[in-house]
Amino acid sequence: MYTKDFYIVKKHLLIILLVFLASGHLAVAQPHYRIQANFSVKEVKSDGSQSLSMGRVFYDLHHGKVVFDIYYPSPHQIVLTNTHVYIIHQGKVTNTSKAPNMLSFSIFNLSMKGSLPYYGLQDTPFELQDIERVDSMVISTWQLPEALVKSRSKLLLSQVDRRLQGLVTFDEDGELVSRQLFENYTTVQGLSFPRRVVQFVYTADGSKDQRITTYSNIMVNNSTSNENMYHFRLPDH
């Protein structure tokens, strides 16, 4: 026959178990909202010239800007919003250019929102035209509907194990414009992120420029340092 003390202990154990399960559920379900990483960008132009940039990048979904804090070859910042790109030297904006939706389609925003596998195209007017499988790779073709545009460019996406591997862009004449490769994926706190992105940009004369971006020391949902970068304020301009 059970005593009153037994039921009290049982009740306390049940409460502890429920708290444990709830905290575990919250840890698993915690959304991704910020990312930072070290990066390097090597560019090789069609004329043979090369350049190298190195720094750190910060992005917080709640603040709506990607901040590149570059220390090589010269200290400066590049800030990307959903409308403009700002270049900042010594606390002053030295250049501004329009960049509609560039933030939305940045690798950081797409990764945070879980939209990278399809490059966010599901949330755009682009329509899926075709899909095929080649061994372990799935290739999908996307186009804007004819009702929206007269000249339609085409995008090809390739995926392996539900991870974006390639993005190929064609113009309205079917000519190759650019090709991007997403490689060397890692998983940080449940977030899948490519540590290497290679882009080829093709010109009408058949030449191509190449950009290789590598990421390291990737941190997700870091809330212990670099708040000034996540909350970066643009200087008056």
Image (tube, helix red, strand yellow):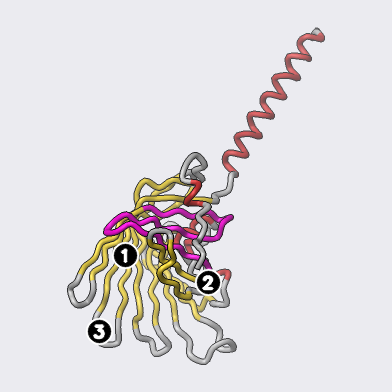
Residue 69, position in %: x, y?
39, 55
Q: Residue at x 51, y 45 (%)?
A: 221
Residue placed at 82% from the left, 9% from the top? Answer: 4
Residue 212 picture location, percent across and down: 29, 63
Q: How many marks?
A: 3
Look at the numbered discs 2 and 3 and tell me whether their residues touch, using CB distance below 8 Å: no
Q: Are marks 2 and 1 in contact (CB under 8 Å)?
A: no
Amino acid type, callout 3: Gly
Q: Residues within 10 Å of mark 2 (few under 14, many from 20)?
A: few
Label 2 and label 1: CA atoms lie apart by: 24 Å
Residue 74 colored magenta?
A: yes
Residue type at tag 2: Thr
Q: Is residue 30 above or below residue 2?
A: below
In the image shown, does 211 or 195 lie closer to the viewer? 211
Q: Which residues are magenta?
A: 56-82
x, y (%) of residue 37?
Answer: 39, 50
- Side of 121 relative to 182 (left or right): right
Sequence-first disc among 2 and 3: 2
The residue shown at (57%, 41%) is 28
Q: Quadrant of residue 199?
A: bottom left
Residue 215, numbered label: none
**Pointer 3: what residue?**
206
Instruction: Sort mark 3 into few (<14), some (14-19) or many (20+) by Cα contacts within 10 Å.
Output: few
Query: Closer to the N terminus: mark 2 or mark 1?
Result: 2
Mark number displayed over residue 198? 1
Position of 30 relative to 208 (above/below)? above
Q: CA distance from mark 2 to mark 3?
A: 31 Å
Q: Residue furthest left?
A: 48
Give how far apart the Cα atoms at labels 3 and 1 are.
18 Å
Residue 119 seen in this snapshot: no
From this viewpoint, is residue 221 visible? yes
On the image, numbered disc 2 is attached to which residue? 83
